[in-house]
Image (tube, grey):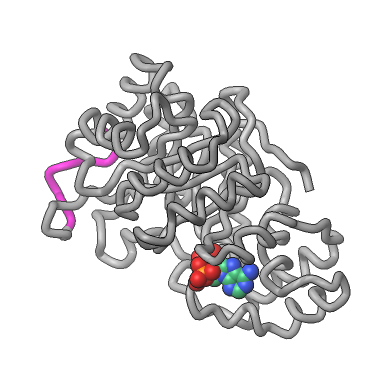
Amino acid sequence: VSPNTKLNTGAIMPTVGLGTWKSKPGEVEHAVEVALRHGYRHIDTATAYSNEAEVGKGIKASGVPREEFFLTTKLNNPDMGHPKEALQYSLKQLDTPYLDLWLMHWPAPMTKEGGPDKSIDWLDTWHQMVSLYKAHPDKIKAIGVSNFCVPYLERLLASSDVVPAVNQIELHPSCPQQELVDFCKSKGIVVTAYSPLGSDGSPLLKNEVVNKIAEKYKVAPAIVLISLQANRPGINVLPKSVTKERVISNFNVIDLTDEEVKELNDISKTAMFRVCHPNWTGWGNLGFTEAV
Ligand code: A2P
């Protein structure tokens, strides 16, 4: 496993980062501090997680200087109409002068009430993110997207002179999304995996194949699942935990053989349990946003 991945901006992104989705205030500050004290140099958050301020406090508590770690946050769906203000809000909450990576969280503008906002086209918001990135290189080191499938990326790439540095998507053995991963790779977009364990209540930790490989290497099943993504070329992985021991152990990814990577990804052929699977083409299908 390579410890870092290079972005199309030339910047270096550490392969394993701490995920903070569903990490509650009151828990996440400690998790971030523990992570940074135990070797993590990559922290991922989002305005939608309502924990940026606490992530910022955890960073301060760790004592790790800002320039020594990679920090990502994401533009929230209800903020798609005013990205400049949203950026300022995130920087203030995180108490940081700059972001290493700023992502569009979903190609799905939403109203404050939570429904789709049909008055906004996410592509216009992307162009505004590009303008902000070009105008403020001191505040935004790279921009990218999250939860984008191939047709959405094709639409973006057709009208943007900036290629997203990253597409952050759900990846685990029930959701390998190989076609999307290959597409991103062909365009120079690094893929970051969230929910590598399959998220809360995941049946993957009890999966037979996962446990067989865990026994072989004498590691916990979670380590096999996190390592799977880190072993796929050019993929970063964001294990989420607020439990000290797990935060520490999740960082220790192991090398898997190509055969094991295939065997793990093949779990998707028989054990689908997520809406997000290789044939999934985006929230548009669920009526959440207009189709591309
Ligand atoms: P917790 O944060 O309470 O430690 P995912 O990364 O797929 O979204 O999964 C996150 C979920 O997996 C959280 O519920 C988290 O619990 C749990 N988790 C994180 N690390 C481990 C681990 N090493 N073993 C078992 N469960 C874990």
Q: Nearer the viewer, residue 285 or 203?
A: 203
Locate residue 194, reporting x and y percent: 52, 57
**Residue at 14% of width from left, 52% of height from top?**
111
Q: Which residues are magenta?
A: 116-124
Locate residue 222, reporting x and y percent: 67, 70
**Residue at 37% of width from left, 28% of height from top?**
159
**From this viewpoint, is residue 277 visible?**
no
Locate residue 48, reporting x and y percent: 30, 52
Q: Is residue 185 left or right of residue 60?
A: right
Judged by its main secondary structure, the magenta piece is loop
Q: Is residue 65 left or right of residue 86?
A: right
Locate residue 148, reporting x and y percent: 43, 49
Q: Is residue 128 left or right of residue 210?
A: left
Q: Quadrant of residue 4?
A: top right
**Residue at 60% of width from left, 55% of height from top?**
179
Q: Nearer the viewer, residue 210 or 280?
A: 210
Q: Nearer the viewer, residue 38 or 288?
A: 38
